[in-house]
Amino acid sequence: MAYVKIPKDLTKVKNRFMFGLTRRQIVFFLCGAAVALPLFFIIKESAGVMPASLTMILALLPFFLFAMYERNGMYLENIIYAVIRQERLRPKKRKYVPSCIYGKEKRKHDGKNREKI
């Protein structure tokens, strides 16, 4: 009898598009190839094959990281945005403002507003 493993958490299941890669990964790899291949051929003519191949690898590295890196369901651009938002956009020190409903009532009925008996 055939046995098929079905994961319990279906949110982690991803649709494979081509060659076992997702659409996102294919798009990023194609963008990386569009940047790195012309760069390789331009540098190969002037500097040689070895520096051109190293430059191509360095040009492909960001695209590879953006395509493949995922942690806790967040992709690399989401992680970078969260870090920037936490470190730069939001204040480091938060001002404490109590939200006590009794504090407002106490201020209304302080000694000045009381009637003398």
Image (cartoon, rainbow, N blue to C red):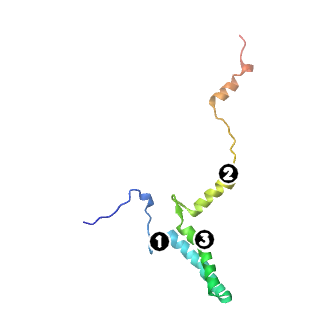
- What residue lies at 61% left-to-right and 78% top-to-bottom? 35
Question: Real-space Cα distance between discs 2 and 1?
Answer: 36 Å
Tell me which label, 3 or 2, sits earlier in the chain: 3
Residue 115 x/y as whole percent: 71, 15
Residue 6 x/y as whole percent: 35, 61
Q: Quadrant of the N terminus?
A: bottom left
> Which image quadrant is residue 55 in?
bottom right
User: Label 3 belongs to which residue?
Assistant: 62
Q: Nearer the viewer, residue 35 or 83?
A: 83
Left/right placement of residue 115 relative to residue 56 reads: right
Asked whether the residues under the numbered discs 3 and 2 touch, taking CB atoms below 8 Å apart as contact, a structural biologist would say no
Is disc 1 surrounded by few (<14), some (14 to 19) or many (20+) residues within 10 Å? some
- What residue lies at 67% left-to-right and 87% top-to-bottom? 47
Compared with residue 32, is residue 10 higher up or lower down, i.e. above or below?
above
**Residue placed furthest toward the left:** 1
**Residue placed furthest toward the bottom:** 45
Specify the label residue 21 is tagged with. 1
Q: Nearer the viewer, residue 17 or 44?
A: 44
Compared with residue 93, is residue 71 higher up or lower down, i.e. above or below?
below
**Residue placed furthest toward the right:** 112
Tell me which label, 2 or 1, sits earlier in the chain: 1
Q: Quadrant of the C terminus?
A: top right
Residue 42 x/y as whole percent: 65, 85
Element under label 2? loop
Residue 25 x/y as whole percent: 51, 70
User: Label 2 belongs to which residue?
Assistant: 90
Q: What's under tag 3, amino acid-wise?
A: Pro
Specify the label residue 32 is tagged with. none
Element under label 1? loop
Numbered label tally: 3
